[in-house]
Amino acid sequence: MPDSATGSVLGPRLVRARAFAARLRVELQVLWRADPALQRWLLAFAALQLFALLWDQPGYYGWENDGVAPRGLFGGIAQNLIPGHADRYPLFHSLLLGVLALPVLVADVAISLSSAERVADAVLSTPSMTAIAVASKLLHVAFSLIALLAFARIFSTLFGRRAARWGVAFALTNLSVGYYGRVTNVDMAYLTWVVLWLDRLLLFAQQRRRSDLSLLGFSAAAALATKDQAYASFALPTLLFWGWLLEGDVRARAGSLGQMLRVALPAYLVLSGAAFNPFGFVRHVQELAGTNSQDWRLYEASAAGLLANLRALFEQQHEYWWPWPVVAAAWLGVGLAPLQKGGSQLSVHPALARCLPLSAALSATLGFTLLVGRSEHRFLLPLGFWLSGYAGVAVASLPMRHGSPTLPLLTGSLLTVLGALHAAQLLVTQWCDPRRELERFLQELPAGSRVETYGYGVYQPRFDLSPESPYRVTRVSALGSAAPPRIRGMLELRDDFAAVEQRRPDVLVIPDEFARRFLTDASASGTQRAMDAFRQAPGASWFFRSAVADRLPGYQLLELGQPRLPAWYTRLGGSIVRVHGSTGARQWLLQRKSSVGQLSSSTP
């Protein structure tokens, strides 16, 4: 084909892509300029997030369980594009992160051109991995700010500016929103695309611009191509909007829905990587519906399991989001929402329209969280995010005596402070992580000491694996088990855990989050099927049970690493906050008895 022919095909598409990008940029500028007071809140929130995101940096790997960076970036791109291969997440978000990380990778290549091995060493060095992790976290902070801006416009459209501002205040102090808005997990990223979709849905209802349908389609595709579970957030809002809220006859409503889907489907095929790797996409879907979800269920796929799941979700709301008074205000706001008078900019079925955010929250919970039988923070993130707005509705609904907002202001401020204190406990927990103290202890070991550890890097301290380190680290994996991702500079060994007396390391570092896989009874309620392979490893249960009970022959328990919280903090009632095995994790530290004299001076 002549170059002119290729240009004639790609030219119009590039023009449309640029116009589309310009439109998105303009929309973000409009959102940002809508409320100057909100700008100040978000800037303060961003500053706090920038401080908090450094809790596990610098490092060759991060402490965020199921995060996509730093090392996940390469697999996220390669596994989605290599024919027949599949990654746990679709392609789109890895591509976005790859663009941000490109300057770092180009610099690594530029300074290491002499050999491919040197390039690999530079790319996988701690400085480069740290830069990629920080870039990912900064991207997610930006996503959370965009989500909150769109969230403010949604609730302002439905309930008025006062309710929207209080809703943003509660979202800013929501523990799960804060945490997942500053880590490398993609949960806040996909939720942001869902929020942008719902915001555009309301704009389309008001203005009926056909171009909004293209933005709706792209937002839906981007959400699904970021994380598959986004599908659940669209079901109920789509039914509610196109079934009841959108004016017009059936044919007109079906036409607008069809136009959105005509953009969403091809965009999803491209952004997810399915268009480039169809067989890998099929494999990805099979794994998603199979081992990636079913093997990690916490609750049985039965009526009893569903009830247990619902009970856990109800009982743990104060851990996921805010203390109980704020949780109660949020659900009160849900009840008050359809009864509100005025404030809504939608004239058709205003009571139903005010339930749109709630429908997205319930849709995500019913269509995914309960379906896969989970109850961790991130699986309830959409519900908590949207409930923040309804907490704002509850405060804004409080009566004003003689036109004075004193009661709403005092009540809202008190509830916001309660939420902020709860979120602050997570910050303290992160910065008091026992792995930091353990790292200092290891640096004081005698030269030539041998350290043995187990499990995934996400659970472990940041070991010094440089040639100058006083110790050498061996990571032991069970015979016949799947190997964890390799860590450069760490000796990897497949062996019976119980053969520790033959290996005779000086120090054992046992992350509790890994050890508990062997400490849980396989018949216990809520046990995940994926844990069975670990428990069946020869000698594994005996080894870990003996170690944490200080009965391991030849070794003694030196320290149980708990977050060392400040005394003033505990006197004020502060406590450890555990999030998905990433924060508040304990570390079991054991030493070989024959090394007691050598190691005693460095005991933490």
Image: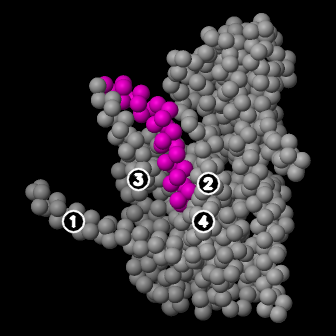
Q: Earlier in the sequence, mark 3 or mark 1?
A: 1
Q: CA distance from mark 1 to mark 4?
A: 39 Å
Query: Circle 3 is placed at which residue position?
Result: 274
Which amino acid does the dot numbered 1 rest on?
A: Gly
Task: Answer whether residue 405 is visible to the viewer in this image.
Answer: yes
- Disc 4 element: helix
- Which region is colored magenta? 115-143
Q: Quadrant of residue 255?
A: bottom left
Q: Could you say which disc has been placed on residue 334 in the image?
A: none
Which amino acid does the dot numbered 4 rest on?
A: Leu
The answer to whether 311 appears left or right of 289 in the picture is right
* Majority secondary structure of magenta residues: helix
Q: CA distance from mark 4 to mark 2?
A: 10 Å
Q: Earlier in the sequence, mark 1 or mark 4?
A: 1
Q: Does 142 appear in magenta? A: yes
Image spot of residue 467 (x, y percent) = 52, 17
Residue at image position (39%, 73%) is 23
**Dot 1, crowdedness within 10 Å: few (<14), some or many (≥20)?**
few
- Colour logic: one colour
